[in-house]
Image (cartoon, coloured by chain):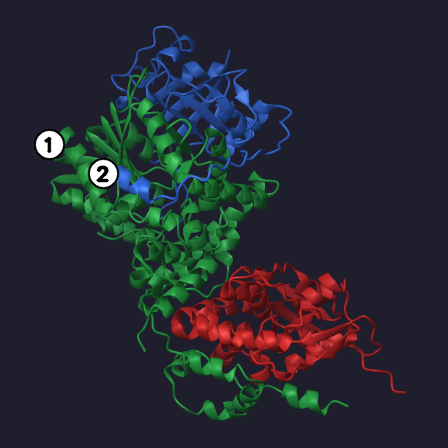
Amino acid sequence: MTVKLMLTCLCDAFYGEVGIATVRVLEHAGCTVQFPKSQTCCGQPPYNAGDWEASRKVAEHWREVFGDGETPIVTPSSSCAAMVREGYALLFGEHRNDPVYELSEFLVKHLGIDKWPLARSAGTLLQQKIAYHRSCHGRGIGLTNEQEVLLRAVPGVEFHAIEQSEQCCGFGGAFCVGHPAVSAGIGTEKLQHVAETGASILVGGDMGCLMHLRGLIEKQRLGIETRHFAEILADAIPAPVPA
Amino acid sequence: MTGRDAILAALPDPEGTTPPIPFDRERKPANDPWLEFEEVLVTLGGKMLPDGALPLLVNRPGDVWFDDDALPFLPEGIARAATPWDAEVGVCLADLAISETGSLLIAATSGRYRLTSLAPPVNVVLVREAAIVASPEEAFARVSAASSVIVTGTSRTADIEGVLVRGIHGPRELYVVRVR
Amino acid sequence: MKIPPVEEFARQLAPDTTASVRKATANLTVARTRALGVAFEDANAARMRAAAIKNYVLDNLKSLLLQLEAACQKNGVQVYWAQDAEAARRIALDICKKKAPNGGLIVKAKSMVTEEIHLNGFLEEHGYKPVETDLGEYIVQLDHDTPSHIVTPIIHKNRLQVAATFEKEGLGPRTDDPTVLAMQARERLRSYFRQAKIGISGVNFAIAETGRLVLIENEGNSRFSTTAPETHIAFMGIEKILPREADLPLFLRLLAGSATGQQLTSYVHLISGPRKEERDGPTEVHLILLDNGRSGVASGKYREILRCIRCGACLNVCPVYRQASGHAYGHVYSGPVGAVLTPAMEGVQKAGWMAKASSLCGACEEVCPVRIPIPRMLLQIRDEAVSSGAIQEAAPWGLYAKGASHGWQWRAGLKLLPMASRFPHPLKDAWMESRALPRRVGRDFRSWWNDRP
């Protein structure tokens, strides 16, 4: 199956490894990945801030880049997927049903994958204890436990749910700089719950959350690593057998 | 223009839709509704007592207030307190018990006092053996047109630090006695 | 850059208060989930039905209000219509003057709508002594404070603060036992219930079909306030209607479960008017229907907020509320519901800023018993507020949009990003106050993609 990668602005700017992992995961799942190079951002930052005029401009560009309406578009962010699927309807006053999927949603719901990796590796397993943060914008696209199912399937992963998992990390786009103390307070509480699990890796599915949490972790010198779930999945893909 | 006219004029015109049907909740009736009632009541700070306990409960001369229709179930010659405010014990007859929620439906019908089940710190509620329904939904199908109260456990508050305190303004003790 | 009110308030909040609010809200959130799980096989279906019934009410508000008015009058309840807060206060004062011309004690049951119209201060100016009789509201009143939560008004206080107030007011010796504190309040308030000639309450639901006013509570103060005095004055927002009594079980369960994690509250009070064949109860019942901006909301794009049944579940689950507390919002209705209801009722110009105090996480909609799309409306309010100039955006979104509308400009911008981090900007300072700046981690995606064989 051919899919288009919607990289997201954050992965474009800072977190290229997440984009690379997403491509590797999709290819391991049997997909041919295309990358439309003129892509930019989905327009969510100004949309959330209330500047819909600015957001519409960006969204129109998105539609030019991605909008054939047929090839599935996969993105490693529930937030960006929700923006296109739900946000654009408000922004433009009409529902268009762009075939945009968040990565885990695409793997689990559309490809029917419930184990990972799809071929067993003969090598040694990486033992890792991870705490998982469920990003809020999964709510906007009806995600339930897709990311959890995949992470739990990875050999060597010791999965820890965190307390009050329904709680936000405090990022919220422009909110995190508009209300920095409130945002940091929410994030710090979240990190306390992460620390309670004893895990040294915090895994999430949205780089917005992870960028904010990583900023807090570094400032507070908590020694917790942050990773996107696509990176955990990509690490578990067996190396190709040398010819 | 009066306030009434102004408010009505500002409201959208009725669209002539029909209301969605009331929510119907499927629930298997308990095998023994009184047993279920008792189990739930205990979790709400109430207690069921055998009717033999009634004379003991009201053995406090001058401290008992009761409604007229509860009198036939009380020991002969019992004296009524001056007012419900002065009584330690209030005895009333409930119209229905609700087994699922451990609730009591008490209507302010002829001759009853609303304060009987409210002002005295100890409330004794008499319920006829047959007057029990499975759920609030069933109770509402049979509710009286008179002002009524559905009592579910003792009076309580958790306003201070979320700590549950039983008995604040309403009764702190609630006893239910099945009568014939 | 101006600091928004919620942020400013949160910054000066005592750690004690944050701890109280966090603990209580987390407990209430757990209790809610458990209670609704017990009450309904499919809680989501129940909430959808409740939403549909409330939508019906909003569609047919005019005819339902007329039906309610007629049914109430038939029950012997006197009905009044108040367009705004001032009219509602005047109507209440006129009734009070007739019943108690020389002023005096008024017992009040907990009611958000009377908070909304600032009734107490007004009655005090006119020689009356309204006393809040819900334990939490009583404490708020003694402290000259305001409720910080629509269901648990003193969620921001701890027992020691309450004990100090009670000691000062002569209610009893200082104690750290909540039961003893409750008993101290009980003694004082009981004498008030017995003396007062007038009782004031809100209404949780009013049944159009039968004219029955439904009040729910746990303490019994609401029953006392509407039973002991000769006159009962009830206030209700015009949206509080339910069509039929058969709708009540659903709403009673949803409200009790969502608000306090109960199946039913201790008391559900069904008021069918003044005393009839019973021997006590008020001889007069007055119902004041309050608009105060609601009719406008009912026909606008924020109409779904009028489905709200004031359970407070969205406050309890809201990360911003938990961090900042209800007082941070500076209005009677706080948290997610307040951030929509207030601008909807009072205008985006005045209160649109409230919608910015949200991370848009969506937890509010997820727990709402009537499925109000709060996040969607927060976004719409932001749009309205920014495009009308009611709030100024600090970020240069126009510039961003320009750069993000062309692939080549975007790619050029990305190259400049590392340099941009050297320039000062207030938003950068806000980020860096508690966070390290984000930096490129590992390989760049586009280079990797271009270099692929």
> Residue beneath label 2, please?
B2
Q: Which hue is chain A drawn in?
A: red
Q: Residue at x 69, y 90 (%)?
A: C450
- Of all chains, the one bearing label 2 is B
Quarter of the figure with residue C268: top left
Q: Quadrant of residue C430?
A: bottom left
Disc 1 is attached to a residue of which chain? C
Q: Which mark is residue C101?
A: 1
Amino acid type at image mark 2: Thr
Foreground residue, C111 or C29?
C111
* Residue C382 visible to an observer of this rendering: yes
- The correct choice, above or below, for C345 with respect to A17 in the image is above
Q: Which chain is green?
A: C
Amino acid, disc 1: Pro
Chain identifier, blue in the render: B
**The N terminus of chain C - image quarter:** bottom left
Q: Exactly how many numbered labels are in the figure?
A: 2
The spot of residue A71 in percent (x, y) is 71, 71
Estimate the x, y position of residue C320 in percent, counting from the top left. Answer: 42, 63
Q: In the orientation shown, which residue stands out farthest toward the top? A: B76
**Left of A166 or right of it: where is A160?**
right
- Determine whether the residue tagged by mark 2 lies in a helix, strand or loop: loop
Q: Residues within 10 Å of mark 2 (few under 14, many from 20)?
A: few
Q: Which mark is residue A169?
A: none
Q: Is residue C365 left or right of residue A39?
A: left
Q: Are labels 2 and 1 assigned to the same chain?
A: no
- Is residue C57 shown above or below B116? below
* Residue at (78% x, 75% y) in the render: A28
Residue B55: percent from the left, percent from the top? 42, 14
Taking the spot 55% from the left edge, 27% from the top edge, the residue there is: B99
Residue found 47% across the figure and 59% down from its top: C375
Label 2 vs label 1, nearer the camera: 2
